[in-house]
Amino acid sequence: MTRIALPAQEVEIDTPTGVDPVWYEKLSQLTAFANLFSEVDFNAMTTGQVLIWNATTKKFSPGAN
């Protein structure tokens, strides 16, 4: 499992020259991690639902267990 350690709280994301390079690297890693969930449809998910594979949409969608 890969762990992503974020910079210290006092390290500003936005600097006068653009995004801090350390933050940029970490945000890129988080984006790559989030893309792993492209097959999951989180829209309209409510408490108590589970993810069910939908062969038509080729995504996991929320549904009743």
Image: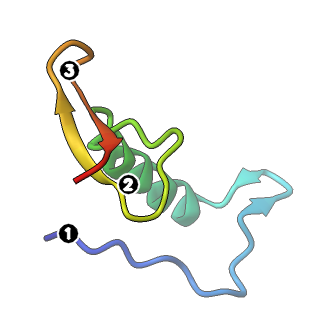
What residue did someone put label 2 on? 29
| Frontmost residue, 60 versus 3 | 60
The amino acid at mark 2 is: Gln
Q: Residue furthest top?
A: 56
The quadrant in which the C terminus is found is bottom left
Mark carried by residue 58: 3
CA–CA distance between discs 2 and 3? 25 Å
Mark 3: amino acid: Lys
Q: Give the farthest residue toward the front.
A: 64
Label total for image: 3
Residue marked by disc 1: 2
Quadrant housing residue 1: bottom left
Return the residue nearer the eye: 5 or 46. 46
The answer to whether residue 44 is left or right of residue 40 is: right
Cβ–Cβ under 8 Å for marks 2 and 1: yes
Please provide percent x and percent y for residue 13.
Answer: 71, 64
Separation of marks 1 and 3 at Cα, in angstroms? 26 Å
Amino acid type of the residue tagged 1 in the rendering: Thr
Say which residue appears at 32% left-offset and 51% top-offset.
33
